[in-house]
Structures are given as C-alpha cells and as structure tokens.
Image (spheres, rainbow, N blue to C red):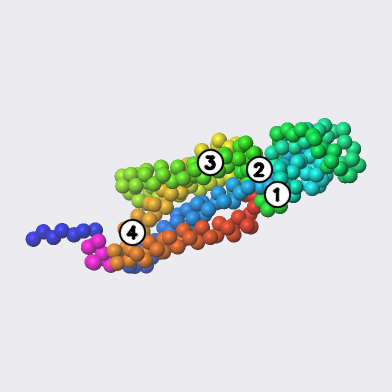
Amino acid sequence: MEVTLSFNDVFKYIGDTGFYQILLYFVVCLPSFFNGIQNMSANFFAAPMDHWCKIPRLGNFSFETQKKVAIPYVEDDPTEYQSCQMYDLYYDNLTDDQILNWDRNITRNTSLIDCTEWIFDRSEFISTINSKYNLVCDSSWMSELTSTIYMGGVLVGSVISGLISDKFGRKVPMLLFMVGYEVFALVQAFAPNYTVFVIVRFLNSVCNVSSYLCAYVIVMEIFGPTHYVLLSTGYQIFFSVGFMLSAGIAFAIRDHEK
C-alpha cells in the first residue's frame, strides 16, 4: 500500500526541534537584524542639517556673526535665518571691525541672491548625504528620493528572491544576497556622487530584502508547523532589535561616511 507524505509529515518521524535546528535558526535570523537597521538608517544618513550660504570672507568668524552679516531673516520671523539666500554685497571690501560691529540696518533694502555654496551646522551630525552632496534648497527633493528608491529595491527584491530561491534553493541565494548587501552597504558610504549613491542604495535594498525573505523561508522550512507562530514572531524580534539599535548606532557614529 502506497503512503503519501506531505513535507510537514516528515517531522513526525525525524523530530521538529533539535539542537542543529535551533542553532541554525539564530544564525539565519541575522538578515532580519540587518534589515531592521537598513530600514531605519535613512532617518540618520539623510537627516536635515541647518545650513546657510558660504561666504569665504566670513569664514574665520563665528557662525552667528556670519549669519548676522550676510543672511536675511525668514519672512515674518525675525528669529530664524534663511537657508538658501544671502545679501548681495561685496564682502571682501569689509574690514574685520565692520564685520564684528555689523549693523543689520545697513542691509535693510539690499537685494538677495541664491546660495551657490553652503556651510552646515555639524553640532548634531558631522556628515549626512545632504552635506556631502549639497542636497539642500532646490535639490532638497533628492534627499527624500533616496527613500523612494530604497522602497523600489524592496519591491524588486521581493519579486526576484522568490523566483531565485525556488530555482536554486534557499541557502546559496541567501548567502549571496547577504554578501551583496554588505558590499553595497560599504560602497554606499563612500559613493563619490549622488547618482552612484542612489544606484548602490537600490542594489543594497534588493540584496537586503532578498536575504531577509530567503532566510524567513528557511526558518519556516527547518521546523515543524507546531512552531510556526513562535518562530515567525521571533524572526521579527530580530528585525525590531536592529530597528531600535540603529538609533544608538547613529547617536554614537554621527558621520555618514563612517
């Protein structure tokens, strides 16, 4: 008499929880941990930084003095300086005494011009992609676009990871995607320009979510069905830990390039 067994029926004979399975579970949960870090990272490497126009003549003076001399207030708010415009003055003609004792009434009717270079307040963040690639003022939308591109990579990775893992197995694709994730994450930090950054960010996202999903399938396949709810919840706990730790990492390392 022929007996038909489903995949889950096999666990009734070989056991569904052993030392090897538990050990493998914790190893395979690593992609979930790193996925949590990556999903949160844009809040820090793309964090806004206070900025204003850079004027070489004023470079040796304090930030407050630079703003007082060259930067207009935001309209209807005499306590906040503009970030993208400055007074149209020839600052090289000013003496140090004039700068230090500047009277803002002098610039009351002075026209404004747009910034071409910026100074960034690095008291909170030493470096972000906004300061590295000057993603401010008319280019500020490019900073927000990085998150959209990242989610585009999540979409692509979610589709191709299932197709690849079904054809070539779970382990090899997971390992290759993990290697790709680490490589692209490193390249991303040292990207020479914005275009390279977003391309690598997209590839990083594809590899990140692909390794995450391949690992999740492995977790579900190495244990019996009686543990599915507990295992899937535990897998997401690793994600949550990475999600939370990213804030501490960003607090300790405030330079985007490190």
Q: Main secondary structure of the magenta part?
A: helix
Q: Is residue 10 covered in magenta?
A: yes
Q: Quadrant of the rendered structure where residue 206 is?
A: top left
Q: Which residue is mark 2?
A: 131
**Viewer-nearest of labels 1 and 3?**
3
Q: Which residue is mark 3?
A: 145
Residue 77 % position (x, y) = 72, 47
Q: Which residue is mark 4?
A: 220
Q: Quadrant of the rendered structure where residue 189 is?
A: top right
Regarding mark 1 in the picture, which secondary structure is present there? Answer: loop
Amino acid of disc 2: Ser
Do the residues bearing badges 2 and 3 touch, measured as CB atoms within 8 Å?
A: no
Residue 122 marker: 1
Q: Which segment is the magenta one?
A: 8-16
Q: Does residue 183 appear to the left or right of 218 in the view shown?
A: right
Label 4 Cα crowd, 10 Å radius (few <14 / some 14-19 / many 20+)? some
Residue at 33% from the left image edge and 49% from the top image edge: 169
Question: Which is nearer the N-term, disc 1 or disc 3?
Answer: 1
Label 1 Cα crowd, 10 Å radius (few <14 / some 14-19 / many 20+)? some
Regarding mark 2 in the picture, which secondary structure is present there? Answer: helix
Residue at 80% from the left image edge and 44% from the top image edge: 68
Rounded to the nearest angstrom, the CA distance separating label 3 from label 4 is 35 Å
Q: Quadrant of the rendered structure where residue 93 is?
A: top right
In this view of the protein, can residue 93 be seen by the observer? yes
Question: Which is nearer the N-term, disc 3 or disc 4?
Answer: 3
